Image (cartoon, rainbow, N blue to C red):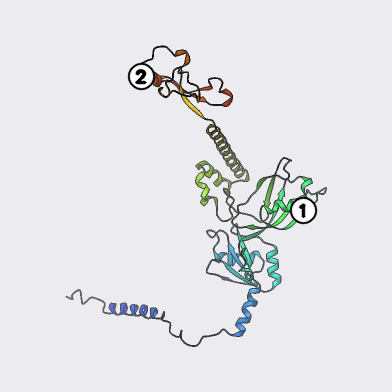
């Protein structure tokens, strides 16, 4: 009968030794052999091609990397530009994608039709030659329509001033109304990718005239955070989502569900806005009440002691047990009995309002007396 050692595969140790040897020699390639010899130089023809390639190169970055992978951007955008097969692309280490165009005409056409989206989220694109600019891949070119602006304020400088609150204004457009078309006011802006979208804002045009509530609509905008307005994440991962109730989150989920009808989605969003408005109103009222209470100074005085607000007290008299003028000359109660009576007396809050200082003050029941 053969022993267990005889049944062992004799080549097992050899294979392990070979694998180990591969790793050893692979690691030895990290030695800087040749680093001390003469320097190499790139050929002149390769140097000439490099700037030529990058003169018509666009760098693209997805604003929401959780839903926009570089490989998807590389495949989808040439189709959106209608340049399939006519543009080269290369993914960079930072997740951006370089697109190399055949001609300047193509790159100008793409820039003119911006912004673009992939999987519903916006992408930022800039010329490669502008990579040293501080706003490189930091802006989205938007055309923003301004709604509800009164007719008399539809002047270029007024419109430009309003648009500057959203971003750097590149162009102002004021289209007059006709029989078949309403007036249209819009601006083209460079919108910072980290700024929140603003769809409604109360604007004071002149200090002596009531403000107007304007609406803003962004051409080309699709998905955004419906809690904070960010272009870079969905509402489920928003930091402000923790402030919402479970019901509010359910309504937002319903309002963005593509498998429901438009009426169901609109109804859910209306309910969400109603709940949010009620909460904001409640917080405002609570804040105002707290401010009013903090502004009013009050003291607690036992009923029947006759003490007046801010009245000076004799150094020999215990706080809260001063004797009213009409009680002077009467027999004093024992300290224990007086303290017990004061503790059982109902507490009332005396508000020290200046207009009531000549009377006993405004007395408000603060706490019912305990039962004996």
Query: Looking at the image, which is closer to me, 128 or 346?
Result: 346
Q: Position of residue 224 (x, y in %)?
A: 59, 53
Q: Position of residue 16 (x, y in %)?
A: 31, 77
Q: Is residue 6 above or below residue 72?
A: below
**In the picture provided, is 236 more to the left or to the right than 138?**
left
Locate the C terminus and report the quarter of the image it occupies: top left
Image depth: mark 1 or mark 2 in front: 2
Find the residue positioned furthest to the bottom. Answer: 38
**Quadrant of residue 292 in the image?**
top right
Q: Is residue 36 above or below residue 143?
A: below
Crowdedness of circle 2 by 10 Å Cα count: few (<14), some, many (20+)? Answer: few
Question: In the rendered picture of this protein, how many numbered marks are placed on residues?
Answer: 2
Find the residue positioned furthest to the front. Answer: 315
Query: Looking at the image, which is closer to me, 254 or 129?
Result: 129
Query: Looking at the image, which is closer to me, 292 or 277?
Result: 292
* Numbered label attached to residue 156: 1
User: Considering the numbered disc 2 on the image, is that residue within a helix, a strand or a loop?
Assistant: helix
**In the picture provided, is 319 more to the left or to the right than 310?**
left
Q: Position of residue 87 (x, y in %)?
A: 64, 72
Q: Which residue is mark 2?
A: 335
* Residue 116 visible to an observer of this rendering: no
Locate the N terminus and report the quarter of the image it occupies: bottom left
- The residue drawn where x is 55% and y is 43% is 251
Mark 1 and mark 2 lie on one chain; the one further toward the N terminus is: 1
**Quadrant of residue 24 in the image?**
bottom left
Find the residue positioned furthest to the left. Answer: 1
Give the CA distance from mark 1 to mark 2: 82 Å
Q: Position of residue 288 (x, y in %)?
A: 57, 35
Crowdedness of circle 1 by 10 Å Cα count: few (<14), some, many (20+)? Answer: some
* Numbered label attached to residue 240: none
User: Considering the numbered disc 1 on the image, is that residue within a helix, a strand or a loop?
Assistant: helix
């Amino acid at each position: 009968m053969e022993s267990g050692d005889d049944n062992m595969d004799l080549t097992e140790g050899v294979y392990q030794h070979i694998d180990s040897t591969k790793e050893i020699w692979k690691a030895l390639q990290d030695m800087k052999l040749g680093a001390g010899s003469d320097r190499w130089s790139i050929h002149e023809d390769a140097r000439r091609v490099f700037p030529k390639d990058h003169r018509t190169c666009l760098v693209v970055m997805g604003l929401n990397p959780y839903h926009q992978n570089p490989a998807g951007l590389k495949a989808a955008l040439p189709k959106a530009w209608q340049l399939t097969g006519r543009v080269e692309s290369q993914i960079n280490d930072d997740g951006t994608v370089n697109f190399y165009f055949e001609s300047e005409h193509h790159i100008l056409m793409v820039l003119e039709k911006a912004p673009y989206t992939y999987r519903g989220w916006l992408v930022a694109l800039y010329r490669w030659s502008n990579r040293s600019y501080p706003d490189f891949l930091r802006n989205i070119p938007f055309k923003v329509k301004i709604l509800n602006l009164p007719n008399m304020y539809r002047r270029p400088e007024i419109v430009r001033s309003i648009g500057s609150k959203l971003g750097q204004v590149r162009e102002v457009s004021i289209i007059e109304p006709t029989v078949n078309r309403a007036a249209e006011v819009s601006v083209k802006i460079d919108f910072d990718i980290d700024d929140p979208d603003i769809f409604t804002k109360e604007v004071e045009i002149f200090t002596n005239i009531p403000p107007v509530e304007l609406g803003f609509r962004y051409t080309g905008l699709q998905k955004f955070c419906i809690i904070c307005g960010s272009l870079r994440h969905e509402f489920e991962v928003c930091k402000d989502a923790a402030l919402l109730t479970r019901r509010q989150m359910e309504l937002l989920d319903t309002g963005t569900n593509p498998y429901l009808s438009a009426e169901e989605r609109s109804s859910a969003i209306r309910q969400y806005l109603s709940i949010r408005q009620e909460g904001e109103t409640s917080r405002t009222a609570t804040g105002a009440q707290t401010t009013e209470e903090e502004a009013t100074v009050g003291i607690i005085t036992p009923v029947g002691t006759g003490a007046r607000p801010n009245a000076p007290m004799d150094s020999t008299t215990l706080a809260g047990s001063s004797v009213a003028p009409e009680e002077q000359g009467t027999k004093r109660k024992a300290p224990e009995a007086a303290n017990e009576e004061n503790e059982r007396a109902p507490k009332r809050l005396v508000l020290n309002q200046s207009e009531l200082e000549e009377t006993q003050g405004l007395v408000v029941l603060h706490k019912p007396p305990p039962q004996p």
